[in-house]
Amino acid sequence: MLIKKIILSLIALLLFSSCSKDLEEFNKPAIYWYSKIIENVSNGNIDKADTYYSSLQSEHIGSILLPNATMILAISHMHYEEYLLSQHFLNEYDSRYASINEKEYVEYMKVKAKYMALPNPRRDQGLIAAAILEASKFKENYPNSIYFPIVDTILTRLFMAENALNESIASLYNRIDKPKASKYYRDLKPQPWIDWSKVNKANSPFYREMFEGDGTGSWYGFMLPDTRSVVSRNSMEQEQKLLNKNVGGSSNDSSGLYK
């Protein structure tokens, strides 16, 4: 019983000490928060650096150190592959601090962050569309940029990723017996300058391909019964025609089966 009380007392003391330490972390000069951000970024503790950034921003909204701190965190999050957080800080820098000369670089970094955030070519239709829009805007706004060739390559890869995703969707509709929807997605190739017959499918790592397949089917497909989709209008119409042919009745004879 005594040992239990000692352990509980130690835990309470540790909690109180940590809380007291956190309570002291306020009303500090801007250079204090900035140095803490640099220290934690250097140590790889990006989450803690974000916390100190919040303190710097809330206590010193007009500090000349804020622009540098914002860009440091944008680059740090990109380095640690936290691309969505990197986009957040890039947007913050772009809207509040970027000069005319800095806009080009910041916009390029935003394109890069969106592109790097894509997990694989057959996921996140919305993010692919957003990345294509961002890259297209950059090419339109900065035709003479030193980053233009890089963004152009990124945009081409994004078009191919979009096509791979559309092909996967078309294959899915084909498997559930929806030919019109399948044809619609297969016809979505608005870039005539790309020879799609020469574009190879992206290769997934073997451990992911085991579960995802190649986009045309699943590895466990052999275990599923070979039946038509019960939710497909096309299947219903085909079965109705078959029933009409077998019983020689009108189209209304078996309509009750599908109500």
Image (cartoon, rainbow, N blue to C red):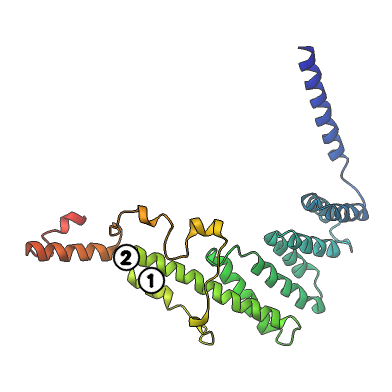
Measuring from the top left, give residue 37's x and y in whole percent.
85, 54
- What's under tag 1, amino acid-wise? Ser
Q: Which residue is painted at 42% across and 78% down in the image? A: 187
Name the image quarter holding the N terminus. top right
Q: Nearer the viewer, residue 163 or 18?
A: 163
Position of residue 244 in the picture relative to residue 5 (left or right): left
Name the image quarter holding the C terminus. bottom left
Q: Nearer the viewer, residue 6 or 68?
A: 6
Q: CA distance from mark 2 to mark 1?
A: 9 Å
Q: Which residue is painted at 36% across and 56% down in the image? A: 222
Q: Which mark is residue 177?
A: 2
**For residue 226, what is the image quadrant?**
bottom left
Number of marks in picture? 2
Q: Residue furthest top?
A: 1
Q: Which residue is painted at 82% across and 62% down in the image? A: 72
Measuring from the top left, give residue 132's x and y in whole percent.
60, 75
206 versus 102 height, above or below: above
Q: Which mark is residue 182?
A: 1
Position of residue 127 in the picture relative to residue 13 (left or right): left
Q: Earlier in the sequence, mark 2 or mark 1?
A: 2
